[in-house]
């Protein structure tokens, strides 16, 4: 038995090893610390700490940059995240300038660490790397995460794509100042569609799931509305 088990184990080990692609340390280092080249521009600061930032805030920092050559030098920047922008411009001969960093924490709660790559205009390899870090304090107001309105509810998406005898969910938030129990408008809604929230009663500012079920065969042009004092167009949940 041992003669059979040992080759089998060796085969499994070799197969798993063959499928595992190891990234060389030199490649990982080049990503974490990209190679830079000398140019006629010098960045005065290579690390920026934004500290603790409220999620709803947009903050700005400035990094000095100067020219050490005998002519004006254009520079450009790229960043590692869309939440961070950095200005580009021209450093005049023997004069300083500033790279303006803007960071928006909306939708990015928690610690962050990004980079700004600074290039002289005629170079493809950065002349400097600016490390940016900080911490975004999550906002208690999550309404911005729900861009669609349906009655008293704010929804993550305007509707669902549903098939026969299935159930779909939409993340929702009660935007009113009273408890809400969602009920289907039976006069305007197609038969076979059912709707409720989890929890069944949403307290003010409470988040939950809007649960939509189709307990029948799917038909064309199915409609779903919730009850409420709003116009039908303000109470419709799109059914694809």
Image (cartoon, rainbow, N blue to C red):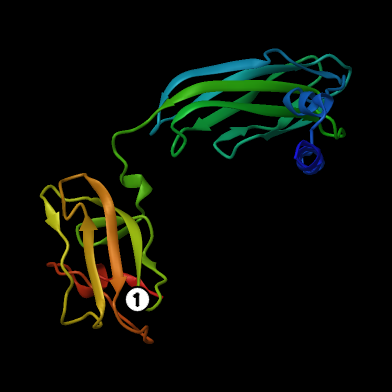
Mark 1 surroundings: few (<14), some (14-19) or many (≥20) residues within 10 A: few
Q: Residue at x 78, y 23 (%)?
A: 29
Where is 121 relative to 18, above or below? above
Residue 173 on image: x %, y %: 26, 50
Q: Position of residue 152 (x, y in %)?
A: 19, 57
Q: Position of residue 212 (x, y in %)?
A: 29, 67
Q: Residue at x 20, y 69 (%)?
A: 226
Camera-side residue: 128 or 9? Answer: 9
User: Measuring 77% from the left and 27% from the top, which residue is drawn there?
Assistant: 28
Q: Quadrant of the C terminus?
A: bottom left
Could you tell whether 113 is left or right of 227 in the image?
right
The picture places residue 130, in percent across and down from the top left corner, at: 68, 21
**In the rendered image, the vertical position of residue 146 relative to residue 221, given as above or below:** above
Relative to 108, residue 238 above or below: below
Give the residue at the far bottom of this rendering.
220
Left/right of residue 19 with respect to residue 146 in the rendered view: right
Q: Quadrant of residue 214?
A: bottom left
Q: Is residue 15 left or right of residue 169?
A: right
Front-most of 123 and 190?
190
Residue 75: which quarter of the image?
top right
Residue under circle 1?
165
């Amino acid at each position: 038995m041992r003669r059979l088990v040992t080759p089998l184990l060796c085969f499994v080990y070799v197969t798993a090893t063959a499928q595992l692609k190891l990234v060389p340390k030199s490649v990982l280092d080049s990503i974490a610390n990209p190679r830079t080249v000398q140019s006629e521009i010098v960045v005065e600061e290579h690390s920026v700490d934004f500290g603790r930032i409220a999620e709803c805030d947009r903050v700005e920092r400035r990094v000095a940059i100067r020219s050490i050559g005998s002519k004006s030098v254009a520079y450009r920047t790229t960043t590692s995240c869309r939440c961070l922008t950095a200005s580009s411009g021209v450093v005049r001969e023997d004069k300083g300038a500033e790279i303006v960093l803007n960071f928006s924490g909306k939708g990015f709660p928690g610690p962050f660490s990004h980079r700004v790559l600074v290039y002289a205009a005629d170079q493809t390899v950065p002349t400097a790397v600016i490390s940016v870090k900080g911490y975004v304090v999550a906002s208690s107001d999550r309404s911005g995460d729900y861009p669609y309105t349906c009655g008293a509810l704010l929804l993550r998406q305007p509707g669902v794509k549903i098939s026969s005898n299935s159930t779909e969910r939409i993340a929702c938030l009660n935007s009113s100042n009273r408890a809400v129990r969602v009920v289907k408008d039976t006069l305007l809604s197609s038969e076979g569609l059912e709707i409720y929230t989890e929890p069944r009663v949403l307290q003010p500012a409470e988040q939950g799931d809007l649960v939509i079920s189709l307990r029948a065969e799917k038909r064309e042009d199915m409609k779903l509305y919730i009850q409420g004092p709003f116009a039908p167009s303000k109470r419709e949940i799109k059914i694809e």
